[in-house]
Amino acid sequence: MQDEKPKNTALFRFLRQPQSFSQAGDQGYLLGLRGFFTLSSFIWVFLTTFAPVCVKDAANRKGPFWQEVLRDIFSVLFWNQSLIYSFFIILSARTVGIPFLLSSSKIVVASAVLRRGLRLWFPVAVSLAVVKIFSSTIGTGYIDDFKSSTGNVSFDTPYSIPNALAYFNSVFNIFWTTSKFFEQAGNIAFPSQTLWIVNVIYAQSYTVYMTMVIIPYTRNSWRVKAYIAFIITAWWVQSWAWYTITGLLFADVVMNMNFKERSHRGIKIWRNIRCPLWVPATVLILAGLVMQYLWTVWRPQYANKELVAHTGLYYTGGLNTSPNLVEPQARDDIYLVVLGSFLLLESSDFLQKAFQNPLFLYLGRRSLSKSCTSLLPLFFPWHRIPTASHHALLFLPFAPPPSHHPHHHPPPPPYSISLTPPLTGWFLTQSIIIYTAGIKLHQNLTLTHNVPDSGATAVCFLVCLPTLVFFAESFYRLVDWPSCILAGVVFDWIRE
């Protein structure tokens, strides 16, 4: 006779806080890496708003000398928009397949596919609803006044969603659009116009789902060759899939092919001569950074010349001679930096420990809430891995059949969580805070109290940061986490 299910299961699911995870092959450093770029995204949004001369690729090129120095030296490394969104996209692909690699069963795939949309839809819907309320009540005229008084031409005033139908369509298209991600209403209505990243991550997650299912049934060497062929063809047609499949490739080689152990032996050159992995990894990083610095300091007008080296898939049979520069691009120079960085990170115990510091781990767990308020550092939904304990499961009350795959990883214990929590908290709140409280405070200080621009900017930073922490944490607890629980409950319900 089966034991009766606890009556407080639903309440327990709702109230239970996510626990720290170390079950997915001790890969918590990936969460810390996302936390680092979450912080970078906040700095990028803040500086683009209040000190645009400091920001690489900003339209404001001339300004105070110290801002130009910050741009030329630090912007490429620490608040580089292309680097930030590229890392978020590849991190999503690197982590979204971890539950399946730990337990390669059809129920894990079904759970991931169904729950991902729900986990993302509700945070995005709530954040855009907040944006709609603000634009309807306080308007956007104060943003135009701020841009006029400061001479900031590096960001656009958000589009005002006119009615409820337009709001619904804006949210719907975030999870429907497969091209021209930047130009959709939901993105241009969102402060900092970074909501397109959720769109790309969500769409590309299905590239991962469709590719990862072959992993348990194919040989390692042939999979690596297929990944490389996929990456080259996706690069040629300028699809985000070349970033996505690179992330899945790293997940596969780390979890199934003893990448770290092999990397410590180095790359065989000839007979007993081996080259340490850090050498080519460093060369890749330096090559990408040199190009980025050249485009920043020396010849900004050449920055997009590399985009021609793809096929113009939708308008010509030749090269991509007329790229859509309104759309954020998957760039070659950034790819070299990302690829080299992951080679170093996945092979270095020191770097992995460095990224597992408490600050980065906290920011990584709250990142999507932050991005809705500032930059949208991508989001990665929580996954619960099935175990053999029927009643101990939080999301998936089933016991998967044992796997005989040679690289099968035993499932983690009950209530364990993988490395893919939603990215919504910081991402969905930072831009809103900066574009409302930050801009209004700056205008009040400079126009009413005659505070110098630099002083007003410093005050705005000191006010926006703690305000963001509070609202991102609230968003996480009131929206992010309940949406994860709801997705799990829905998946349980459709299986009963």
Image (cartoon, rainbow, N blue to C red):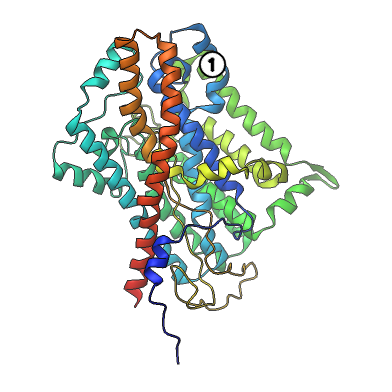
State which quarter of the image contains the C terminus: bottom left
User: Is residue 105 in sight in this rendering?
Assistant: yes
How many labels, in total?
1
Farthest-out residue, bottom: 1
- Of the residues shown, which amino acid type is indicated by label 1? Leu
Viewer-nearest residue: 412 or 327: 412
Residue occupying the point 42% across, 26% down: 463
Viewer-nearest residue: 213 or 376: 376
Is 295 on the left-hand or right-hand side of 274?
A: left
Is 448 on the left-hand or right-hand side of 402?
A: left
**Please, what secondary structure does the residue beneath circle 1 have?**
helix
Say if 399 sits above or below 44 in the image. below
Q: Which residue is the site of mark 1?
A: 70
Residue occupying the point 46% across, 25% down: 462
Say if 332 sits above or below 472 in the image. above
Q: Quadrant of residue 288?
A: top right
Q: Position of residue 372 (x, y in %)?
A: 36, 39
Q: Position of residue 231 (x, y in %)?
A: 51, 46
User: Is residue 114 in sight in this rendering?
Assistant: no
